[in-house]
Image: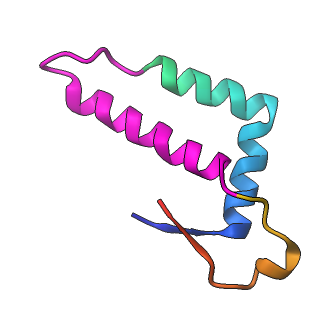
Amino acid sequence: MADLNKRTTAMWRSFLSSDEGIRGLAWILERRPPLTEKTWQIAAGFERFNECIQEILNTGVASKDDDDKEDKLKV
């Protein structure tokens, strides 16, 4: 998995908080297949995606001073 710095996380949070981001996220999650014997792996990918997005949204806002630091968010 990739690491996100605070600046990138703040930009994602800003986008996902916008009307377009909210609609886009809802659109993606609506397409999650049901949990069945044949589709559980695909559905698990959607769940992992949602967990990563929630981790980004729950991360504190980065200040300008923190942008240059190597603080990473494991995703």
**Residue 37 magenta:** yes
Q: Residue at x 79, y 60 (%)?
A: 61
Residue 40 falls in image quadrant: top left
Residue 31 falls in image quadrant: top left
Q: Position of residue 56 (x, y in %)?
A: 61, 52
On screen, 5 above or below 9? below
67 left or right of 48 in image: right
33 left or right of 20 in image: left
**Residue 20 magenta:** no
On screen, 36 above or below 62? above
- Report the span colored magenta: 32-59
Q: Residue at x 63, y 78 (%)?
A: 71
Please, what is the dominant secondary structure of the magenta stretch?
A: helix
On screen, 24 above or below 74? above
Q: How many marks?
A: 0
Residue most extreme to the left: 37
Q: Which of these two is toward me, 27 or 37?
A: 37
37 left or right of 40 in image: left
Q: Residue at x 80, y 28 (%)?
A: 19
Q: Residue at x 73, y 59 (%)?
A: 60
Residue 49 falls in image quadrant: top left
